[in-house]
Amino acid sequence: MTTNAKDKISKNDFKKTILADYRLAAEVRECGSQGRRDVLSGKGTFGIFGDGKELAQIALAKVFRHGDFRAGYYRDQALMTALGQYSPKHMFSALYADPELEREPSSGSRQMMNHFGTRFLNDDGSWRNLMEQNNSTSDMACLASQFPRLVGLAQASQVYRDNPELAKNKPGFTNGGNEIAFATIGNSSCAEGHFWEAVNAIGVLQVPAIISIWDDGYGISVANDVQMTKSDVSAVLSGFQRDSKGAGFDIIKVNAWDYPALIEVYEKAEKLAREKHIPSIIHVVEMTQPTGHSTSGSHERYKSKERMQWEKDFDCNLKFREWIVESGIATKEEIATIDKEVVDFVKVQKKEAWSEFQAPIKEELKEVISIFNAISAQVNIPEIADWIKDLNQSATFGLFRRNFMSKARILLGMIVNENIPEKATLRNFINRINSENYERYNTKLYNETATSALKVEQVKPTYDSDSEEVDGRIILRDNFHHMFDAIPEAMIFGEDVGKIGGVNQGVEGLQDKFGEIRVADTGIREATIIGQGIGLSLRGLKPIAEMQYLDYVIYGFQPMVDDIASLHYRTHGGQITPLIIRTRGHRLEGIWHSGSPMGMLLNGIRGMYLCVPRDMTRAAGFYNTLMQSNDPAMVIECLNGYRIKEKLPTNIGEFRIPLGKVETTRDGSDITLVSYGSTWRIVMDATEKLERAGVSCEVIDIQTLVPFDLSHDIVESVKKTNRLLVIDEDVPGGGTAYILQKIVEEQDAYNYLDSEPQTLAAKAHRPPYGADGDYFTKPSSEDVFEKVYAIMHEANPVKFPPLY
Ligand SMILES: Cc1ncc(C[n+]2csc(CCOP(=O)(O)OP(=O)(O)O)c2C)c(N)n1
């Protein structure tokens, strides 16, 4: 070991430290081998392990400090164990899919094994002190998806260092901006766009990230020559190296089996990042994958004999062992003793994890079998005996609740006509198990704590009798100025947001007043604009990430769908991103400036809120509400609304529009018209003409698609009108299908309808450019008129004769 690294460890502790590191490496390796056997024997369904990657991760852990953040992936078992956040027992609990959070703290087994995450939130939804713990943002199986958020995790340190006043008031979120964001990624995942986008953004921002690339030569079966130009990611990355021409990264290549070199490399990277905020990329090469990618296949199929032999010879644990013995730190016998102790320790941990997982299920099995027996004594159902036999047999190998629940539910159907008391016992048992498992598997999609946006009190916009009529964008702009004055954590960034104040001037003058960090232009990189927001929001800031147009949200959709929307659910309420995504959409001009893909959004981002304000007052009100909460949300402003006049409220910056509350904007008695966003104006316009034709319309603005009409006001309107038309400008069966499902099925409007509930949407293709392109593809006021009239004609052809 080099003197530098040696000096770090006192002589007395030196041997102890090295052997503890060896023990940890051996433990992770043994977990892989015993875990693999468990999958083969059927106790777990899928195994993916950290073997072959141990040494580099142990070196990394030595420079990871409380208050640092990890954005990594499923190989980081040694790192997580070294950080004290994981154990063999945790791994086995996860492998068995034990749903109890205390035994599988990353996700309560909502995720596959070895997808790590620590808790950022207390049970009441308040933030923990993140500076007193090692923080691991929740992993995803989607490769490279940890990279967008890395940008924000690292940038937060810069924000806090740049603003000591703010940092002083956020002790749970920063130690003066000294925190490092550590990322890990496999070599093949570096072929993903997210990786390059994030590396570029971090290089531009110069924020303290340390990126480790675990290079074992393959991505499942596909080798580096197919994955990467020159088969070498750091060679390709070399243009990002900082030099006399400008800032960039420190890029270092190091062998995965070279313990002293690894320690030195991480120490250097840490110093650069922590003290100077200079990012590093550490390309760890010559890694191995001793048992193949996962339990789903064997690597003999794609690795040559020579490669297999090389992997044996250059196994990092073997090399570490050789180095320990050759340097006289310990004897072969001492190492052998550790190896043996590790095997025994992992066995015990595994056994404990299994029995703790099975114990409550076995108790429930006993209960259900006694109910089955009691029913069998009353009713002749020959299958019951076989079921009991099968269930008892399963119990000796491993039991899932579904094994007995499926039988119990079948049985209830079989005895539905029997008049025996055991029927109620069975029904109660099923209900109880269902409700307990609802808690285990179906909760926490949304934050229901006191920090929820749904708990924010409404404050109505107020007006003077002489309130000015201004362009909609002025309301937004003035509202942002008030917001940034009042909330020091508020930030906004995106394309053209800084210098020119946004393409629609909604943040005009904001950068001049609040500086280039809080109000920032970004590169054109939607996925990492979203990711930047995710990372910043996980670190106690209140970011607004701007997508310039709704149509380009698709570039940033992956982190929205996979990361933001699932985060609270997949961490069992352990993490949340209070991020607001601001965009503008619906109709304007042209295929990519007129989209309104609500169905796509609705299907992808359950777990986030979706606000679709009809004007800028309502948009501002939603921002004000969301800023008071911890919930992630998207607000879609109307592209064609910035120059439409609205009354300027007197309480700008203060008023808050509630989420999930519809607004009836016109009273009527013949039909309920439900809409939102830009089509709301068109609908209102049509109702004037319909009135003249003798049709009285009630118009409801949905305001937020998610949550949807929490107090079920729409059905109250349908009870009165008995007719329903839903209008938007998505494809047919897009947003309108969702809205109909909510009203007809969830609100039970079916029972109050005298006419078929209908929808009016745009055409199924993209909207063409120009005024006529809009007119002939998107719902116009005339389209609304004719559709409503047709419904009335069908109901009363005498009063409403055909139009055509
Ligand atoms: C976006 C995405 N594409 C494909 C997969 C399926 N997949 C899982 S792991 C893997 C290979 C990853 O290789 P690498 O990045 O080198 O990491 P390693 O597993 O070797 O550590 C693939 C293709 C995935 N999980 N996510």
Image (cartoon, grey):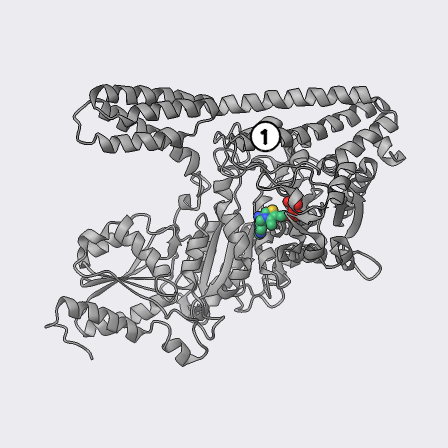
Question: How many marks overall?
Answer: 1
Q: Give coordinates of residue 134: x percent, y percent.
A: 65, 35
Q: In which quarter of the image is residue 503?
A: bottom right
Q: Position of residue 74 (x, y in %)?
A: 61, 41
Q: Is residue 28 visible?
A: yes
From the viewer's perspective, is residue 195 above or below residue 505? Answer: above
Which residue in the rendered view is the most extreme toward the left? 798
Who's the residue at 78% across and 23% down the image? 335
Q: Which residue is drawn at 75% across and 25% down?
A: 20
Relative to 612, is 577 on the left or the right? Answer: right
Disc 1 secondary structure class: helix
Seen from the viewer's position, the closer of residues 131 and 728 is 728
The residue carrying mark 1 is 37
Query: Is residue 186 visible to us here?
Result: no
Quadrant where the C terminus sits is bottom left
The amino acid type of the residue labelled 1 equals Arg
Q: Position of residue 553 (x, y in %)?
A: 52, 61
Residue at coordinates 16% horizontally, 68% vertically from top-left? Answer: 794
Left or right of residue 165: residue 459: left
